[in-house]
Image (spheres, rainbow, N blue to C red):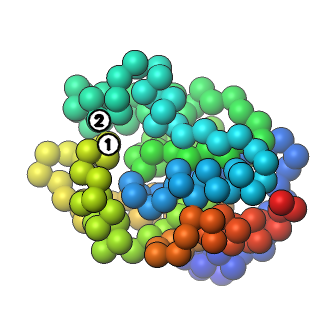
Amino acid sequence: MSENNKEQKAVQKILPDECIIFIGMAASGKSTIGREFANLLGWPHVDTDYIIESVYAAPLQAIADSVDKESFLDIEAGVLSRLNLKKVVISTGGSAVYREYAMEHLKTIGKIIHIDVPLPIILERIARKPERGLAINPGQTIEDLYNERRALYEKHSHYTVQGGEDSALNYAQKIVDLLQIKS
């Protein structure tokens, strides 16, 4: 079975204490879908961007603006690799996939779902919220970032769900069905 067809992959058993972790591009809906998914399951939801903001007592974009991209990725990975959570829905930042050790740690605490949204939708959503924190190099475009990250999202995910224009609740229910979790 191809790597790109993870949505159809045989369901891996979700263990009782495992987390469900969402990865994907900025503006893919990870946090919104994550909240709806957590509500369906009656689980808590954690957005790792908020954890980073809490640890550093500053807005995410201010943190990203105060350091270069590589330093920000190290900050993010440091926070992710220290998560010790059980039975929580976790929405990561879009750049979480850049540090192998952070992603390997996340795999030890749960199943990783890639929310894959087409580039035109990502661009439109980012344009609506330009203050969104992005780990991007000077001169790099969002399209460059999107193309750079796609292989990393596929590499690190157990499942891929196509996102887009449907409601977050519908995507959350689709993921519950995909994982065969009793909500």
Q: Disc 1, disc 2: CB below 8 Å? A: yes
Query: Sequence-wise, which precedes: disc 1 or disc 2?
Result: 2
Badge 1 density bin: few <14, some 14–19, many ≥20, Cα 10 Å: some
Residue 42 spot, x, y in % from top left: 79, 48
Per the image, the residue denoted by label 2 is: 61
Residue 77 visible to an observer of this rendering? no
Quadrant assignment for the N terminus: bottom right
Residue 74 spot, x, y in % from top left: 39, 31
Q: CA distance from mark 1 to mark 2?
A: 5 Å
Q: What's the residue type where badge 1 is placed?
A: Gly
**Residue drawn at the location 47% of the way across and 74% of the way down:** 164
Please tell me whether mark 1 sits on a helix, a strand or a loop: loop
**Residue drawn at the location 20% of the way across and 45% of the way down:** 137
Q: What's the residue type where badge 2 is placed?
A: Gln
Per the image, the residue denoted by label 1 is: 133
**Residue drawn at the location 55% of the way across and 70% of the way down:** 167
**Residue drawn at the location 29% of the way across and 67% of the way down:** 124
Give me the disc on residue 108: none
Residue 12 occupies quadrant: bottom right
